[in-house]
Image: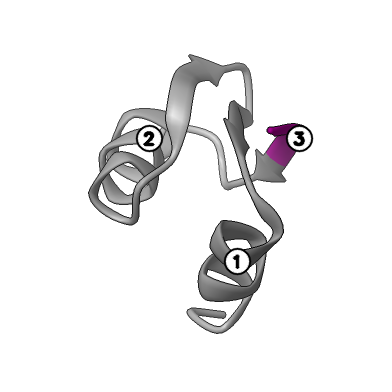
Amino acid sequence: MNQYYAKVAKGLETIAAQELESLGAKNVSPEFTGVSFTGDKTLLYRVNLLK
């Protein structure tokens, strides 16, 4: 598992965390203007395709 950080607009941290969990992210932690999470490379590709 790799550690990742997704930057999001202020106020959207909780929503982004829920979306990441629905995609299969583990250890999801909303933080100030972002969300840290763990996952494999497949998850990373899946998350980036949603941009």
State which region is magenta.
1-5
Q: How far across and how far down the image is residue 20, in percent?
A: 39, 46
**Which circle, 3 or 2, is nearer the viewer?**
3
Quadrant, the N terminus:
top right
**Residue 14: which numbered mark, if any?**
none
Q: Earlier in the sequence, mark 3 or mark 2?
A: 3
Quadrant, the C terminus:
bottom right
Label 1 – label 2 distance at C-alpha: 18 Å
Neighbour class for label 2 at 10 Å: few (<14), some, many (≥20)? many
Q: Is residue 4 magenta?
A: yes
**Residue 42: which numbered mark, if any?**
1
Label 1 – label 3 distance at C-alpha: 11 Å
Tag 1: residue type?
Answer: Thr
Q: In the image, 6: left or right of 35?
A: right
Number of marks drawn: 3
- Which of the two residues, 10 or 44, is positioned nearer the viewer here? 44
| In contact (CB < 8 Å): disc 1 and disc 3 | no
**Which circle, 1 or 2, is nearer the viewer?**
1
Magenta: main secondary structure equals strand
Helix, strand or loop under label 1: helix
- Which of the two residues, 11 or 50, is positioned nearer the viewer here? 50
Residue that badge 3 annotates: 2
Helix, strand or loop under label 3: strand
Which residue occupies 74% across, 37% down?
Answer: 4
Residue that badge 2 annotates: 17
Which residue occupies 35% across, 47% down?
Answer: 24
Above or below for 14 versus 23: above
- Which of the two residues, 13 or 3, is positioned nearer the viewer here? 3
Q: Is residue 2 magenta?
A: yes
Q: Earlier in the sequence, mark 1 or mark 3?
A: 3
Q: Earlier in the sequence, mark 1 or mark 2?
A: 2
